[in-house]
Image (cartoon, helix red, strand yellow):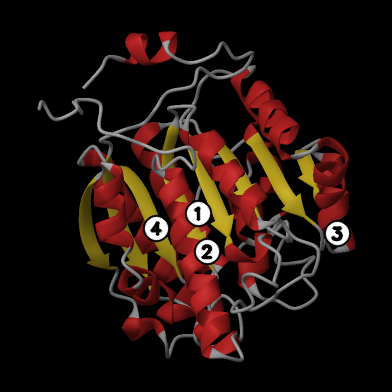
Amino acid sequence: MRSARTLQRSLPPARHLHLHLHLHQSVGLIGAPFSRGQPRGGVERGPDLIRAAGLLTRLQETGCAVKDYGNVALEDLQAQPGPLAVSSAARRLSEALQAVKRDGHTALMLGGDHSLAIGSIHGHAAAVGDLSVVWVDAHADVNTPLSSNTGNMHGQPVSFLLHELRPKMPALPPFSWVRPCVWARDLVYVGLRDLDPAEHYILKLLQVKVFSMRELDQLGVARVMEETCDYLSARGKKPIHLSYDIDAIDPSLTPATGTPVAGGLTYREGLYVAEHLSQTGLLSAVDLVEVNPLRGRTEEAVRSTVSTAVDLLLACFGRLRGGNHPPDYRLPEP
């Protein structure tokens, strides 16, 4: 395998994070079949559907070594009250993700609903220290338990993770184990288009870097991702946690999800976001959440959603639309 220095010389200079072709990386996959962070059943089937679409084989074809750790055992939580179930699931996932990072892999968590990010990001930070987080989503998911209009916990995970919101969080005994692990200055949102008033207030108050769909329309995805990486690199080259909600993509492509919002990322924009972060060489963990086959009205709607999810993950782990080849590839001799 060529050295990072050789790879850097073969790529054009960048003003932001150094770009790397991330070939032959080691991926540790965890499934988290969990739906209790929101009221719609079916999202717990997401991990196995994405696997069944050939994800592992296609990652291996891209040049990744893949270890599938299976699904975190969460079935016994279905009868627990919502917040307790979310806390228990997040804690088990945190422990599982720490084990993946101890084994030296880039972590891939397949959800399940987005409340699981409490556990995945907590576990990632516990394993590696300070993180940058790129949250790609139609929604900000930063309501506090007191500001949420619905009480749905898949709309609250970021509030549990941010240091600056600690004084605004009520005492919730099931979540006493969670310690904030992300600073607002290390968080970037991409693709927002459906915010509650309290969420908009929080993001303005904490001066969080946000690229809503308006900014994407205005600037274009290439500039948005360049500015994202410039912004993060100015605070040091920390490991990046990408939390990707499938509803970031326009529902014309990904209708099988719980809270679709029109006007989302195109297929090409969604892939570009993943490709760009992959090429930083700093992508250390990825969540892909909210694929819900029961919300797709037809088999084609489910197939399109799952296929898009697989393609996004392949882009996260090195597949380029311009083509790939192994670093040691040689043409056959006549």
Q: Where does label 3 land, which residue?
A: 198
Q: In the image, which is nearer the foreground, mark 1 or mark 4?
A: 1
Q: Is residue 76 above or below residue 3?
A: below
Crowdedness near tag 1: few (<14), some (14–19) or many (≥20) residues, C-alpha within 10 Å: many
> Can the viewer see residue 136 in this picture?
yes
Question: Could you say which quadrant of the image residue 282 lies in?
Answer: top left
Q: Position of residue 272 (x, y in %)?
A: 60, 42
**Marks 2 and 4, Cα distance to the nearest angstrom?**
16 Å
Q: Quadrant of the N terminus?
A: top left
Residue at the spot x=27%, y=59% of the render?
56
Residue at image mark 1: 312
Q: CA distance from mark 3 to mark 2?
A: 31 Å
- Amino acid found under the numbered disc labelled 3: Ala
Report whether 18 appears left or right of 56.
right
Tell me: residue 328, above or below residue 114. above
Instruction: Say which amino acid is labelled 1.
Output: Leu
Q: Is residue 21 above or below residue 42?
A: above
Mark 2 surroundings: few (<14), some (14-19) or many (≥20) residues within 10 A: many
